[in-house]
Amino acid sequence: MNLAKEEKNSRLSQELEGFLVGLDGQDSTLGALLDHIAGKGFGLLLLILALPAALPIPAPGYATPFGLLMMFLGGQMLVGKNHPWLPDRLRKKTLKHKTCAFAIRNSGKVLKLVEWLVRPRLSKLATNRAFLSLVSIVIILMAAFMVLPIPLTNTAPSFVIFLLAAGMLEEDGLVLLGGIILAPLAAFIAIMAVYYMVTKGPELIEPMLKNLLGLN
């Protein structure tokens, strides 16, 4: 009983560090990751996949494949699956130790923010089937932006997915609502990045968006 309670109350950073330590410096596979977090369902898997692109530091090459995988997981959530499923081909896909270490060890500020914010609140909302369907649709849309090989189309959407995953993991309906509220802003940033890419060229995307958002 006490062990179960301790596991339930373990912090996100402890969950992620535990997975990294368990790798013992070795590469893993997506299948092994799924088996390790079986009791956590979609939440922890989406959290780990969203984290590299959600960090305010470059994560080249991660956003597109991870975005595709998160769209796939969001689709499973939408049709009502309780646990993630991957075909054998994807289960055998290598998850490099370097990638895991990068995501976990460079995520201090993000994780501290999430650990400060996330706790079981509005749990009935967080477990409501209709509400979780809305969450899954937002995840699919945000992940679709991440797939685009265009600057600034991945960080904001992946942070929204990260918040939603954290809220799912801890049954925090308030954080889930926060993620849904932030989703339109993330979508706006991504859409404007696509617009500037098409009309002005990739080298002007970042300065134009900063000017538009008043960040200069």
Image (cartoon, grey):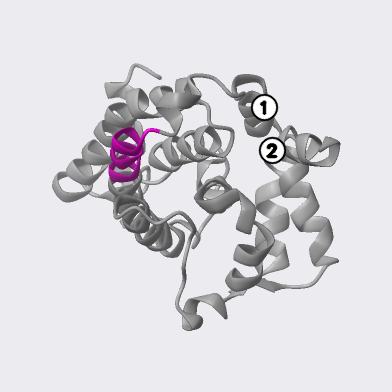
Quadrant position of the N terminus in the picture: top right
The residue under label 2 is which amino acid type?
Answer: Leu
Residue 104 picture location, percent across and down: 70, 47
**In the image: residue 40, left or right of residue 211:** right
Dividing the picture into quadrants, the one containing residue 147 is: bottom left
Magenta span: 128-138
Residue 210 appears anywhere in the view: no
Residue situated furthest left in the rendering:
199
Nearer the observer, 106 or 205: 106
Q: What SS does tag 2 mark?
A: helix
Kindly state the secondary structure of the residue where label 1 is placed. Answer: helix
Which residue in the structure is indicated by mark 1? 115
Spot occupied by residue 208 in the image (x, y as percentages of width and height):
28, 31
Q: Residue, x 30% and y 27% (percent of image)?
A: 185
Q: Is residue 33 left or right of residue 134?
A: right
The vertical placement of 2 against 199, above or below, is above
Q: Position of residue 3 (x, y in %)?
A: 84, 41
Question: Crowding at label 2, few (<14), some or many (≥20) Cα neighbours within 10 Å?
Answer: some
Is 135 in front, or is 99? 135
Single out the residue that lies furthest toward the top.
214
Q: Residue at x 51, y 32 (%)?
A: 167
Please identify the residue farthest to the front as the structure is shown.
1
Q: Confirm whether the magenta stretch covers residue 38.
A: no
| Disc 1 residue type (three-letter) | Glu
The residue labelled by disc 2 is: 12
Magenta span: predominant SS is helix
The answer to whether residue 65 is seen in the rendering is yes
Is 50 in front, or is 148?
50
User: Answer yes or no: do the residues labelled 2 and 1 have beta carbons within 8 Å?
Assistant: yes
